[in-house]
Amino acid sequence: MPERDADASGQRATRARQWRRRGADLAAVLVPTVLFALARTVDSNLLLLVTIMVYVVLAQGVNVIYGFTGYLPFGYVGFFGAGAYGTYIAVAHLGANAVEATVLGGVAAVLVAVVLIPLLRLRGAYFAIASLAAALALSSLVSNPALTSVTNGPYGADLSKVFSAGGSYWMAVVIVAVAMLAVVVLRRSRLGLQLRAVRADQVSAGYAGVNVVAARTGAWLLSALLAGLAGGVYAWSISVFYPTAVFDTTISLFAIVFALFGGVGTVLGPVVGAVVLYYVYNAIGVSDPQYFQLIFGVVIVIIALFLPGGLAAVLVGARRRLALRGGDVR
Amino acid sequence: MFAESASAAPSNEAPRANALLEVEGVTKLFGPLRALDDVSLGVKQGEVLGLVGPNGSGKTTVINVISGLLAPTSGRVLLDGHDVSGKAPFRLARRGINRTFQIPKPFPALTARENLEVAHHGGTLSDGEILELVGLGGRAERLAGELTASDQKRLDLARALVTGPRVLLVDELGAGLSKTELDELAVILRRLVAELGMTMVVVEHLMGFLEQVADRVTVLNAGAVIFSGGLSEALADPAVIKVFIGG
Ligand SMILES: Nc1ncnc2c1ncn2[C@@H]1O[C@H](COP(=O)(O)OP(=O)(O)O)[C@@H](O)[C@H]1O
Ligand SMILES: [Mg+2]
């Protein structure tokens, strides 16, 4: 009889834990989405808000590929540019409306990622450099004058016929929700569990029957999709842009720094990292000399040396210490 | 327990036509080093083959080749008559060959249960049943990294079992365990054979353990098979005695 009581209370505890988890997941998706949806009532600079949302999505994309596989994509901007140009081509040549075109931007980035799957055979710095090279190659392909009839080459893309400040703003809010949902679902999914296993020990994961290449490819394609959607909505919101603007490697760097600063492998870390650091950048970034480069450089060094888990690790660590002091382990 | 080893199989030479697992003339070179030299062995369904030999004689390399971690330089590995040489470990795991490691490598940040959830499930036993079977029933929610070395070995065995292996390769499970733990493991392995009809290759230094689990033994020396037959015959064989005692 006491045993059955223990059993029942154990089950209650498990069920309570499950509900707490579901609540936390739901909040992780809804809170940032609602805050961004309300942000326009506080700050009327919609382009700034869209740009921040774009970086939130990019930081989550880095979170997916780096946080779950350990691949650091210096060429991540390639997917962003592919998304921007996919959106342009969809509007200019396929007669898509802006929403459809943004989605097709995401599809374009996934197609690029499919072509680049062989890069996943490389490791560490080789992968980082090869992905950068791929982004540069894509950039020069898009800006090639021979492709003027498709991409308008170096003369830039013009989406002004579908311009809508409000429309692109709301689209960005939706894409933030998609990115948050993607990370939450990935974290709870079997694929997420398998990717964590692969990171811990590739050989053991193989003997657990995990197809390591397929699992990594899944994360790679998802991360490309997020960057493509971000590129698409960014293109829509700025309306007129040149290849150099959407293939700027600073974009990769920012996304990586934001994600690392907030904490990869967590759901909210990259959001906080992107919002905080982009506001810092925005406040001081346009100064001359450009102090943000110095500051971001210092931030990278500090993270690398002292905070491999990012801001989130500091907060979690503090919480655990508090909990321990209170005698409540876990 | 001793009675089981009394059923030791006849001392016919490997490989055998009706074997579930066959290693056919496998040679493995590491640069100039001939780690395996024309090794052949066969194991029938439901049979446990002990693999013995001095340190560095190539036992782990045999396991690595069968389980796909290494491709043989020449020769073949057959599962149920199909050539599976050089297939990736995850494919072999899904086709029914799995293994444990001399030094287990569980996923330390995952709980014991999550370690099993990760795996491709190919067997009939549930994760809970497997944890119970290997003696980890009470530690399912513990992080693998916090388990003792002995429990990590049990978890490694559990991880292999989840995939539902027909052929289980066990590499020095006994090393570093107490006599009691060893006896427990021997019972577990025999249960897997008796209840699930599992086929095994068991690498082990400890003769007492082999007496409990193995039907037959193959003795390796310097990468070559020098004996194949019953354990008691092996221990009486002049060539085997020379390797183990004479050096
Ligand atoms: N991956 C490897 N690269 C080079 N040499 C190896 C490798 N694996 C094993 N060896 C060598 O092959 C021989 C057999 O090793 P191993 O199969 O581990 O022996 P055992 O398990 O019987 O102790 C040893 O000389 C070992 O040093
Ligand atoms: Mg060995």
Image (cartoon, helix red, strand yellow):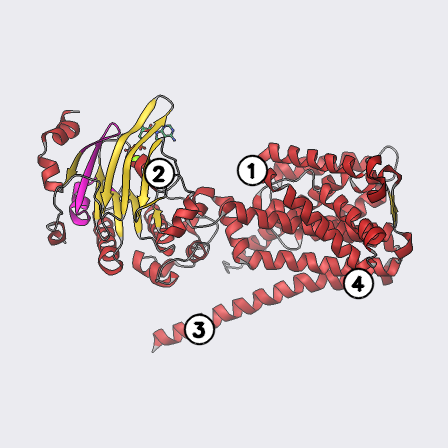
Residue in front for this viewpoint, A218 or B20: B20
Indicate yes or no: mark 2 CB to ligand 1 under 8 Å: yes
Direction top: furthest residue: B32
Q: Chain of mark 4?
A: A
Report whether A270 appears left or right of A329.
Answer: right
Could you tell me which secondary element the residue under label 1 belongs to? helix
SS type, badge 4? helix
For label 2, the SS is helix
Q: In front of the other: label 1 or label 4? A: 1
Are discs 2 and 1 located on one and the same chain?
no
Q: Which residue is mark 1?
A: A121
Q: Quadrant of residue B87?
A: top left
Task: Indicate which quadrant contains ligand 1.
Answer: top left
- Residue wearing tag 3: A9
Q: Is residue A86 magenta?
A: no
Residue range in magenta is: B203-226
Residue type beneath disc 1: Arg
Callout 1 crowding tier (Cα within 10 Å): few <14, some 14–19, many ≥20: few
| Residue beneath disc 2 | B64
**Residue to which mark 4 is pinned:** A37
Q: Is residue B212 magenta?
A: yes
Three-letter code, disc 4: Ala
Tag in front: 2 or 4:
2
Residue sitting at 65 percent across and 34 percent down?
Answer: A130
